[in-house]
Image: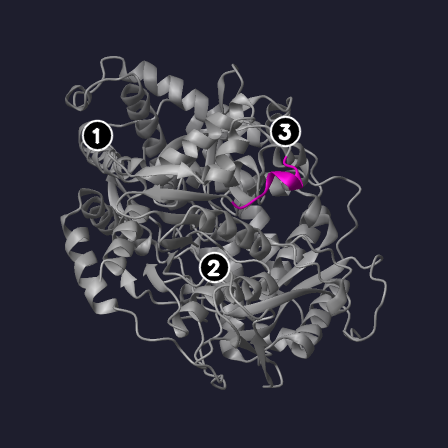
Amino acid sequence: MLPHFFNPHLLMKKFYVAFFLILSFASTAQTYQSAAFNQKAKLLRVFLDKNHYAPLTWNDSASVLLYNRWMDLLDDDKMFFTKAAIDILEPYKTKLDDEMNGNGWAFFDKSIQLYKKAVRQADSLQQIIFSKPVDFSKPEVIHYPFTTNPASIAELQQRLLKLTRWRILNGIASELDSSGKAASNLTAIPKDFAAKEIKIRERLKRQHEINMKEQLVNDTGFENEMADKYLQAISWCYDPHTEYMNLAEKKGFETALSGFEYSTGMGLNQNKDGNYEVDRLEPGGNAWRTGELHKGDIVLSIKKGDGPDRHLAEMDEEEVEQLLRGNSDEKVVLTVKTAAGITKKVTLTKEKVTDDEGIVKSYVIHGQQKIGYIQLPGFYSRESDEIEKDDDVKFDGCANDVSKEIVKLTRDSIAGLILDLRYNGGGSMWEAMQLAGIFIDYGPVGSVKNRDGKVHFLKDPNRGTAYDGPLLVLINSSSASASELTSAMLQDYRRALIVGSTTYGKGTAQSILPMDTAYAEEVKKNYDDYKDFVKVTGGKFYRIDGTTTQWKGVIPDIALPDIYEGLGIRENKNASALLPDNAKRGIYTPLADLPVDRLKTNSNKRVMADAIFMDVKKAADWVKEYTTGRDIPLQWQNYIAGYIKNEGMYKIMQRIDDGNEKGMAVSNNNFDKEKIKFATGSGKELNETYLKHIAADAYINEAYSIMLDWLNK
């Protein structure tokens, strides 16, 4: 199958979502009022000017930023607007700053009017295409992603027709591939191609109809929904992490799946392309502990118990919700596609997570030396929102859990410790400070600068260390925010060796405030009746040496190949990202230099000779090539040649995901070994799965080898 960023089925899902938005708003929605919305947009601007770390100057440059963001949100795949519609909207490109400054208000209303017309027009064209057999006689290609809008309705129809041809070819190839046919047997045009074309086209038509089920047309409700999205586009212009929110948006798909989220420890949400992606991993939940799922993974299908495998593309939200209901012992098999395009199955067991189970788990890697291993996918805290003073803090979050695991590992006489912060998207900065303090005696762990330019140093809240032995931290491009603060501090103190790939580059702090221009933090008020909120960036974090992780990320001491490098998923790829700068340098005493050069030389030799890392480099180059666009042939023999080539790359990616067959010897720590004896059958099975996962992971294997080099001076 094609990777999700080039999957024709997922591309068309955006078409369905857009049309669904127009058709599915309840008739009870409030009537859209342009003047009232104009006032709300002005209020948002005033609020952000008062509270944002770097208030935006609304000029022509800011106008272009907002225009481009809004047009991307409406039609970034160039599947709706024709050039005629763009010609009507283009003159507003440098006029939106005037609107934000109080001079007129027309762009939003005009864009929505044209958008509704364009989506309905595209739907009519798609219905015509589905109504008759698709012609594959012409030797055409489709170039994806589309870089320009279609010049006419006729060109739009051809674009949709080509996309349908692509989807049908992919569907037929996938069916034959799934049936176990050898690649060599796929090259010839199937004898029953016409019958298969009908079958796949009918399936695509059914998917289209399912997504069009909700037929409660209410254009004013639609406009109110899109008005909220426009406010989000405005707030995005200040920086990518500032976001307007309303209470209703919190009751969306994730709420509908609350039972599933509670039982398996994960939440799903529909992204802008209409795909169901992993939105949250609950600390300690089943999904968290498997180590197989990461935020942003696309869920393609769900199999509950002994039932059939159901594709999410063929279901509406109510059906998905019904499918995910069940008892606490029921297993759920997810088919997911990772950001790199790897398709895999992940088995989750529905269970109730209790506090005494413990969220962080530690393991022992055996070999020449015993090395401890702890994975921390997020910086969670068990604190409530009622903390008003230092005495209210209970010190009972991830840092405390890691400390407990270190105690267990110390009893097992480990010679070194690997802390895995890969895929750790951040969380509580307080917990990040606490965790950093576990590994240093005392001193600053970083600083934060507010909008007034004042720098406040963050200090280790507890004197003393929980662990003072050799420490190696694993990071990658999905390590962000709090995980960057921790790894940067450990690097600045030379307390740990940082290994992996450059992190995401988010060095800002946000808080959620009611959209009230009279807001004052020192005055406690009841905001239960507020309907509008903003997650606003109010400060920047800095390393102890005065530099920042913002935009730049944390650069590892020893770099390892990263399959996601080619995707360019980093803070500095966002047009509105805050630029890096410097702050005061803290007063601190770094430890002695680590033997980085020697360890790096040895690691590079191993990586260059390692089959899995060689595959990672091939896959990273392939992913990078694909993100720049390509031509897809739309006749069977040319198409299937590319399909077979892609399948070969997917096999390489699967080898990467499977890891080292030999692997390392990994066990639970001795304390947990005793607890496992009394675990349920599913609990024991999950534990064995995770032990195998750690043992086979190429990055953990290399981290272990680096640690041995370090210890064997």
> Does label 2 or label 3 sit earlier along the sequence?
2
Q: In the visual, does 515 lie left or right of 135?
A: right
Residue type marked 3: Glu
Please tell me in which quadrant of the rendered image residue 678 appears.
top right
Whether residue 222 is situated above or below residue 658 in the rendered picture: below
Q: Amino acid at mark 2?
A: Ile
Residue at which label 2 appears: 86
Label 2 to label 3: alpha-carbon separation: 39 Å
Tag on residue 351?
A: none
Q: Quadrant for residue 182, please give it.
A: top left
Residue 140 visible in the current orientation: no
- Amino acid under disc 1: Ile
**Residue labelled with disc 3:** 321
User: 19 or 565, which is in the foreground?
Assistant: 565
Residue 381 visible in image: yes
**What is the magenta range?**
353-360
Q: Which residue carries the number 1 mark?
A: 640
Query: Mark 1 and 3 residues: CB-CB less than 8 Å, in contact?
Result: no
- Looking at the image, residue 52 sits to the left or right of residue 578; the answer is right
Q: Earlier in the sequence, mark 1 or mark 2?
A: 2
Check residue 354 for magenta coloring: yes
Element class at badge 3:
helix
In x, y percent, where is residue 86?
Answer: 47, 59
Image spot of residue 129 (x, y percent): 42, 30
Q: Earlier in the sequence, mark 1 or mark 3?
A: 3
Residue drawn at (52%, 27%) of the image: 677
